[in-house]
Amino acid sequence: MRNRLRELRSARGWTQEELGRRLGVSRQAVIALETDKHDPSLDLAYRIAALFGEPVEAIFENPHAAG
Amino acid sequence: MRNRLRELRSARGWTQEELGRRLGVSRQAVIALETDKHDPSLDLAYRIAALFGEPVEAIFENPHAAG
DNA sequence: ACGTGATGTCAGGAAAACCTTACATCAAGG
DNA sequence: CCTTGATGTAAGGTTTTCCTGACATCACGT
């Protein structure tokens, strides 16, 4: 699922390790998300949205969105 | 994670099996969500939101929400 | 040339989200 | 009483998400 994670992270000058620390996940998990290896759990998606102050849909593209 | 799945489903008069069919998951998956056995994947959460025409955050309570 | 930091990959494992099948309960109707 | 439909539980298996640890690369500064 396409996302703006790398864009949002580097806009804040954070490393993948720093982002992982702030989200409570490993650096590998961050890499897997940024490189589209897999999708986040809903709970992790909510933590990411809270951290960046944006709705989930604004960060992770919804492939089932209406319209 | 608390959610309004059962409320939204029964408001439409659907059975758990019918909802599972519309979402492309098993009846057990629907039960597990409604009874808080586990959280949906982000992709499934998006399918649910699209089906009911509401944002994800309006269906699944975000425990990390700001404010 | 050397070391350091950031990124990515790989291997192997743990945990959570899904699956199917089977069985129990309980309400409503005939 | 009996059947049927809706719901829930349980067991066992697959797939996906997330983990640690090790290693390769590449840019940068000294």
Image (cartoon, coloured by chain):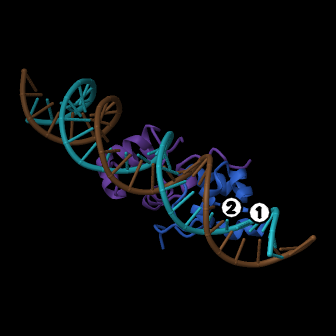
Chain colours: A purple, B blue, C brown, D cyan
On the rendered structure, is D22 left or right of B54? left
Q: Residue A44: x and y, percent? A: 45, 56
Q: Of D25 and A39, which appears nearest the observer?
A: A39
Please report the residue visible at 53 percent of the width from the left and 41 percent of the height from the top: A2
Q: Residue D11: x and y, percent? A: 48, 56
Res. B41 visible in picture: no
User: So how many labels did they put on this image?
Assistant: 2
Q: Residue flagged by tag 2: what amino acid is it?
A: Glu
Say which mark, if any, is on residue B14: 1
**Numbered disc in front, either 2 or 1:** 1
Res. A46 visible in picture: yes
Say which mark, if any, is on residue B54: 2
On the rendered structure, is A31 left or right of A55? left
> Residue B55, located in which quarter of the rendered image?
bottom right
Question: Of the residues under marks 2 and 1, which one precedes in the sequence?
Answer: 1
Subunit that carries the residue with mark 2? B
Residue D21 sits above or below residue C15 on the image: above
Q: Distance between the residues labelled 2 and 1?
A: 17 Å
Please report the residue visible at 40 percent of the width from the left and 41 percent of the height from the top: A32
